[in-house]
Image (cartoon, helix red, strand yellow):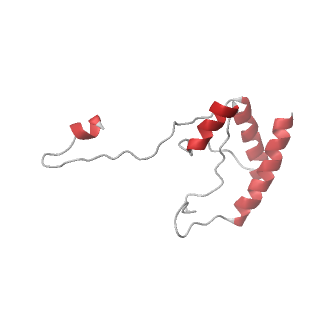
Amino acid sequence: KEHLRKHLPKGVTLEITDGHSGPWYLTDPHSAIGEAAQRALRKAFNHGVALIREGGSIPIVSEFRGILGIETLLTGLGLSDCRAHSPNENFPLENFEGGIRLNKAILQELAH
């Protein structure tokens, strides 16, 4: 907030209204669950894995760690043009089918 106020052009006013929020969340991609997920993703999609940060502000995710004491793994199966949360949101069937393969593969990985 202070940074924004400090850099306001002359004659411009700023009003900030806080909304809902939650703590951030980050899973180590090189932890045991992160490595297992990467192996499962490669197996399910027969392709390399892109490590990106996404979904770390979903409030319930940090609650799983805090209350249940478990790590949560977020795997994005949507594409950049899926238009998430918009009126014309879409999701390719091949990604849905890949998600089924991924769930099977990650359960197999975690069973070892």
Residue at position x 72%, y 40% in the image: 38
The quarter of the rendered structure image containing the C terminus is top right
Q: Give above or below for 57 relative to 90.
A: above
| Residue 50 drawn at (x, y percent) | 62, 44
Q: Give above or below for 108 relative to 31.
A: below
The answer, for residue 28, to whether it is visible in the render is: no
Q: Is residue 58 left or right of residue 39?
A: left
Residue at position x 62%, y 34% in the image: 27
Q: Furthest-left residue in view? A: 11
| Residue 104 drawn at (x, y percent) | 83, 49
Q: Quadrant of residue 84?
A: bottom right
Q: Is residue 32 left or right of residue 60?
A: right
| Residue 44 drawn at (x, y percent) | 78, 50
The quarter of the rendered structure image containing the N terminus is top left
Residue at position x 76%, y 40% in the image: 39
Viewer-proximal residue among 53 and 63: 63
Count the marks: how many? 0
The answer, for residue 30, to whether it is visible in the render is: yes
Q: Give above or below for 70 relative to 107.
A: above
Q: Quadrant of residue 99?
A: bottom right
| Residue 57 drawn at (x, y percent) | 53, 43
